[in-house]
Image (cartoon, coloured by chain):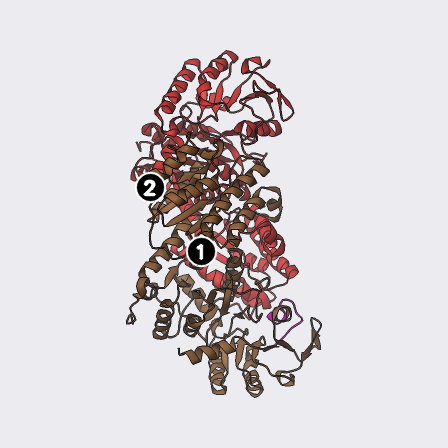
Chain colours: A red, B brown
Amino acid sequence: MKLPEFEKLDELFNPKSVALVGASPNPYSGGYAYAVHLLEDFKGRTFLVNPKVDEILGVKTYPSLMDIPERVDYVICSISAEKVLRLLDECSRKGVKLVHLFTARMAETGRSEGARLEKEIVKKARELGIRLLGPNCMGLYNPEVGLTYGYWFPKEGGSVGAIFQSGGASTDFVHYGTLRGLRFSKVVSYGNGADIDESELLYYFAHDRRTRVIAMYVEGVKNGKKFIDALQYATERKPVVVLKGGRGSAGARSVKSHTASLAGRMEVWRAVFKKCNAVEVETFDELIDQVVVFSFLPPIRGYRVLIAGGGGGKSVFSADQWEEEGFELPDLSPQARERLKEIAPGVWDWLRNPIDLSILQDTPLLPEELFRIVGENEEFDLFVFNLTEDDPLPLDLWEFWMGEQIKGVLRFKREGKPVVAVVSNGEVSMLEIKEWRWGLIAEMRKRMIDGAIPVFSSPRKAARAVKRAIEYWRRSQGNSVNLSCL
Amino acid sequence: MKLPEFEKLDELFNPKSVALVGASPNPYSGGYAYAVHLLEDFKGRTFLVNPKVDEILGVKTYPSLMDIPERVDYVICSISAEKVLRLLDECSRKGVKLVHLFTARMAETGRSEGARLEKEIVKKARELGIRLLGPNCMGLYNPEVGLTYGYWFPKEGGSVGAIFQSGGASTDFVHYGTLRGLRFSKVVSYGNGADIDESELLYYFAHDRRTRVIAMYVEGVKNGKKFIDALQYATERKPVVVLKGGRGSAGARSVKSHTASLAGRMEVWRAVFKKCNAVEVETFDELIDQVVVFSFLPPIRGYRVLIAGGGGGKSVFSADQWEEEGFELPDLSPQARERLKEIAPGVWDWLRNPIDLSILQDTPLLPEELFRIVGENEEFDLFVFNLTEDDPLPLDLWEFWMGEQIKGVLRFKREGKPVVAVVSNGEVSMLEIKEWRWGLIAEMRKRMIDGAIPVFSSPRKAARAVKRAIEYWRRSQGNSVNLSCL
């Protein structure tokens, strides 16, 4: 994709006015949800179109697109499939440049009339010079102009660009990613991808200067060669993390009825991902973990980890899992031991990597100081902090003890040292977060997330995500990506 | 272990009076925490021993064990290591039967004097006829008599017996397990296991009628033959789920400084687990997942799953991950389709297994009714429910829509159908659980957990735990365990 094409798409993705055709007072409908989001969040002009009611959510509606007295850049189409062709004519007369078809029930139904209609719509849009997003998708989340499609999407933007064939999964990605500290340049849910497709979006995000990492959920592509070119182009410029849906036979069947895609053979996909240096993940959780690593960890290329936290059992679990993913845990250095001997003569020879912090509780050595000492004396590629959740302390002491640890971790971060944290994940209800001490654990986790530290819910997940990132960074070292990979 | 020996240990584990030797007013110490727990939870008589202060937490202390005017069954020892030998003499004179050595800094320090002292203590206890739990452990959680060692341990008992070499990990196990609906017959943290060891505890829980599943975290054993006999004995009677700590070299080093154990070669351990039909897991999360399955899922031996939930992306992820773990997703039957055709002519041929519930939102078919129809018409071994978290609905409608789904899932459970649920895990803070709609998701999860449904945080975790359980149930079918496996 040439730069002028990027600029054209970028203009379409930053509309100054949006018309919602099929705005609805029925709160079960998309036509209602989009009206809520536009009215609450969109920074440009919003027009609601509905020929049957005069107002929705207290805002006047227009009987048709043609009745809108002002210019319309962007249309969200939430009317039934058979009415779309007629709407396109109106869009053309109105000068609309992009139509987002939230409208579904086309090729994905598996019925031939649906597939035929989808083809006709694309053909007509091309004739009229209108670009289409969809059909069967949630569309565009662009925090910069306040265009959104989910409740509680963050208003501030960020550096993650996302290309999702599934609207629901993209919504979950925004929600769960936000809790981990991610913010987004743009998220595009493109559904059946009848016009704007994953390849064009890859070029788009590769060019987009706000985007530092690309997250992708793809079920199938129509043009393999085009996709490989685009993926290669993007991975040479920034990390692309891909989750492929429809890997098995039931998954593939499900993909067909979801976005009318052909899932394809997984060994071919894997070969493409590998050749293009795309980072493949297998689950939704891994997708978020991976984007978190690329967003918050500086590139590292070695496997030496220094682990601290506790108590003993947690340290053992952690060491096992990092080692099983190929990391090394060099033992503490003589220099660090000498310093520790001065302050904590009772335990200096007993402390190991992993450092079990519960050993310190009878000594004058506080965790923050220990972190400083090892930070100054040890050679390691990554510092791993395990929050201790089992401390048998009263709440105020426990808060102090954890706070000291978090301070040390945040200092590592400030000093530019690569650091990740592991905080187990209580699956708490509203009730429990008040009753249990989960609230405190959750706050400590949040303090680290707010400090741009990657926080994972298990050592295994942390180790796998960091390992995949190291492999990416090693392969892309010195821009050695082979441009002739196709 | 013969039944009389079980009965002896059972008596020791159900004391009528406990003395805490080394009770302390210092809230950082174990001697404080045990005092709090005894005074708050223990149903028998509690005596606090401290020669330096007159009272702790408003309760009178005794200068020594000998000054206690009543009988003492059980001593929690929280004094320093060098004073333990003298205490044992006093215990003997006082008729104490079990001493729990919270006291640490023995063999696990790696110093020869520590190891020597530990040996002397064991020798002396044996001469005096006193049983020891520990050293270097949190001891016993027995909800029946209110003996506990962690804040917020549940007061009510249950059917999970746990044998943990790590006290901290056992605390996390109780906390996180409780959130998943687990309750415990007894949890024993045995640390260095100098006297009462993992083997004796395996026999104990094998005999214990309250215990239906045994969870075990082991770092090393001193007597391999004895352990294999005990493990075999236990697995013939109930599922034993084992997490082995110290699998790698750093983990093994850590194990040595944690509980003075020799980690041993992992291939030997795996061969033992396999031969004995113990269920091995690799992470702490998996340990809980596995115990949840054995606690709440009836034995199944087939791999056919029917998956429902949504939306489309989540259905695809789910299908992929269940298939990758060896499960099958048979498509919907003609009978079910006929019924669906009557009620939802617009979508009946479009619904597949996995069933994407978001397809229903324009139809008169409610999720609960759909669940009933497929429940009556389909042949499957397991029903898998994926809670949809991305519904673009206002809160009240969303609550209704989710509630209908949960009703259907709970009916399956009532009818005795095997069912599991997957609810993604927002890693929320106190703030977010109020602000976001996470509160509602958390409450829906809790409703299922309170209904004794196994709830997992990802399809992968659910599929792996169920698969391991099926393998166990298949191998133990018809009591075909070979008694001569040794």
Q: Residue furthest top?
A: A93
Secondary structure beneath dot 2 equals: loop
Q: Is residue B34 magenta?
A: yes
User: Looking at the image, can residue A18 be seen?
Assistant: yes
Q: Chain of mark 2?
A: A
Q: Residue at x 56, y 37 (%)?
A: B397
Q: Is residue B383 magenta?
A: no
Q: Nearer the viewer, residue A332 or B486?
A: B486
Task: Using the rendered view, name the quadrant where residue B213 is placed.
Answer: bottom left
Picture coordinates of residue A61 (x, y %)?
60, 19
Where does the magenta region start and end?
B21-35
Q: Is residue A313 above or below residue A303?
A: below
**What residue sits right under mark 1 in the picture?**
B289
Q: CA distance from mark 1 to mark 2?
A: 24 Å
Q: Residue at x 51, y 78 (%)?
A: B11
| Image quarter in which the C terminus of chain A is found | top left
| Image quarter in which the N terminus of chain A is found | top left
Picture coordinates of residue A247 (x, y %)?
34, 40
Task: Using the rendered view, name the quadrant where residue B251 is placed.
Answer: bottom left
**What residue sits right under mark 2 in the picture?**
A248
Q: Chain of mark 1?
A: B
Picture coordinates of residue A356 (x, y %)?
51, 63
Instruction: Check disc 2: other Cα within 10 Å, few if <14, some if 14-19, many if 20+.
Output: many
Q: Is residue B80 above or below residue B437?
A: below
What amino acid type is highlighted by mark number 1? Asp
Q: Is residue B132 above or below residue A66?
A: below
What amino acid type is highlighted by mark number 2? Gly
User: Looking at the image, can residue A378 be seen?
Assistant: no
